[in-house]
Amino acid sequence: MLINNFRSMSIVKKLVLLIIVLMCVPFFLFGYFWYAISAKTAEQNAIAFSEQLMRQTSEHLNSYFHDLERTTYPLLTHPLIQQFLKIPPDDTFEQFMYTKRIKEELVHNIIFGREDIYNFTVLSKEAVDLSSTGGPELRKRNLRLLDTLVPSQNYNIIGVDKVDATPVLTILRVFLDTLSYKNTGIMLIDLNL
């Protein structure tokens, strides 16, 4: 029946049908396969680019935190800070004098030119503290960290917190006494996010 319909068609209709079959069908098949292969290639390229971007970001963060650790390392054994950590809580005059000297000689050098550091705090086990920005809410948070935290390493990333409505990433460093190697306090570095 189909053959009879084909024979009864005019030559123009047969030519149009032949053009459709020989040109359009391969074109549509080629287009479909091209789209499928292109979509798969684009997806693979997006995955490879994302993996490369994550790898670069991870390496940059590792480098940044390593640089921060290296920058703050001299403070761990600095004589002024070691003496500050030994001040009794009731000796406010000594606290004031050491705080002033540490801020003038050490803290300014660390924070100067580094907009990423929001706050820098030194806190002794006896809750004597020195902070670059201060504030009662910050002191409460620092004391809470001192009470609840048992530092297992010398360098810990505590997590994200808010200080004076500013989101910060808090990093903790442990102070060890240079003679007894006992934990004498902590250093908290709050980084702007």
Image (cartoon, helix red, strand yellow):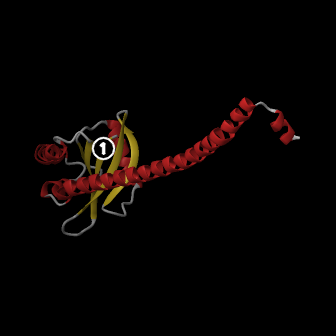
Q: What percent of the width, then of the height, locates residue 152?
A: 37, 64
What residue is shown at x 23% (from left), y 39% (from top)? 115
Q: What percent of the width, then of the height, locates residue 188?
A: 29, 49
Q: What percent of the width, then of the height, locates residue 71?
A: 19, 54
Residue 125 visible from this viewpoint: no
Q: What percent of the width, then of the height, locates residue 161?
A: 40, 42
Residue 171 against residue 19 in the figure, above or below = below
Residue at the spot of label 1: 191
| Observer-nearest of 113 and 151 | 113
Residue 182 against residue 38 in the figure, above or below = below
Q: Specify the quadrant that holds the C terminus.
A: top left
Image-quadrant location for residue 175? bottom left
9 vs 53, left or right, is right
10 vs 87, left or right, is right
What residue is shown at x 36% (from left), y 60% (from top)? 151
Amino acid at pointer 1 = Leu
In the structure shown, which secondary structural element does the residue marked by tag 1 occupy?
strand
What residue is shown at x 30% (from left), y 52% (from top)? 60
What residue is shown at x 73% (from left), y 35% (from top)? 14
| Observer-nearest of 119 and 56 | 56
Q: Specify the quadrant that holds the N terminus.
A: top right
